[in-house]
Image (spheres, rainbow, N blue to C red):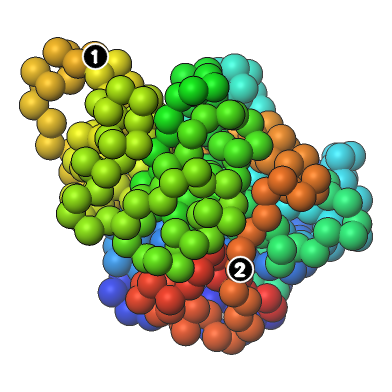
Amino acid sequence: MRAVRLHAYHQDPVVEEVPEPTVEGPLDVVVKVGGAGVCRTDLHIMEGQWAEAMNPSLPYTIGHENAGWVHEVGSAVTNVAVGDTVILHPQPSCGLCHACRAGNDMHCTNAFFPGLSDNDGGMAEYLLTSARACVKLDASTQPKDVAALADAGITAYHAVRKAVALLPPGSTCAVVGAGGLGHIGIQCLAALTATNIVVVDQNPDALELAEQLGAAHTVVSDGSHVDAVKDLTTAGDGADVVLDFVAEQGAENESFEMTRPGGSLFVIGYGGTLQIPTLDVISTERNIIGNIVGTYNDLAELMVLAQAGKVTLHTKTYALDDATQALHDLDAGQVRGRAILVP
């Protein structure tokens, strides 16, 4: 089969032939990939940012946002069958550790992460995963239309789900970044809350999309945006919640500045460094909350919204053989929404 393989850091991956995966354990599932999302994390992987944390053996296949059809199942698999349409939680978990028992399976101590850890990912024709990662979808669902919800979607949904209790009617939520994750977060906010949604981005096209998806106000990131966001809040002192889907190149510190006293900054993007005097944290009692990929239940809930038409992905599709071009387009900011590879 064809697969997108990373042979060395700071180099483009290549599409090459590799053996198809096969079922080895009783809970294994092999999926015929129908859509694989292209994520900014893939760019970070190529740059070696995850090398120390994950230490994968190169070469390996990247791709951690996947949906498709069940191709083969292990002897103990009962939740899906060959031919089922599925979306895959990006981190198959064990179900037995304390984190899994507590419903925090994204923190499973025995998990693996295809396309990120030392396991081949889904930018390929077939992917080996586990029964615990499979969310069965309506047969009419096209995998390429939902694939990026597998990681970008549940990452955004997970943050919004945690923020819901802080966003009653009359509150303000600022969304920093309306790209691949942010445009999903805006829809989740609109579906789950009655908050006043203010979106900040430097791209006019992204802001236009944000308005279509439910933003009450949009602000161009031009150096005056922190004050502009504050001016749109009830007391003029900042947003109740800021969801930072960028968190690099200074956005992370600006996001803290636009959070009101007693408010909460949810850090979802990464790459930057928060530089905040501790006095500013304690004197204003602002909260800084980290967010990683959501749980299996988050994915299941998000797919209910997606299949009801309340959350949709804005995508640009590429053939699997054009993976390098897709990665370059993403890096250059030329992808509106999410790029999807279709084998």
Height in image: 71 above or below 324? above
Few, some or many residues within 10 Å of mark 2 (<14, 14–19, 20+)? some
Choose between 280 and 124: the one closer to the eye. Answer: 280
Provide residue 55's location: percent of width, then percent of height: 36, 54
Provide residue 141's location: percent of width, then percent of height: 83, 59
> How much space separates mark 2 and mark 1, taking CA atoms?
39 Å
Q: Is residue 184 left or right of residue 270?
A: right
Image point (13%, 31%), residue name: 276
Choose between 141 and 93: the one closer to the eye. Answer: 141
Residue 45 lies in what quarter of the image?
Answer: bottom left
Provide residue 223's location: percent of width, then percent of height: 18, 54
Name the amino acid type tagged 2: Thr
- The N terminus - image quarter: bottom right
Image point (50%, 69%), residue name: 336
Q: Is residue 46 left or right of residue 143?
A: left
Q: Is residue 115 visible?
A: no
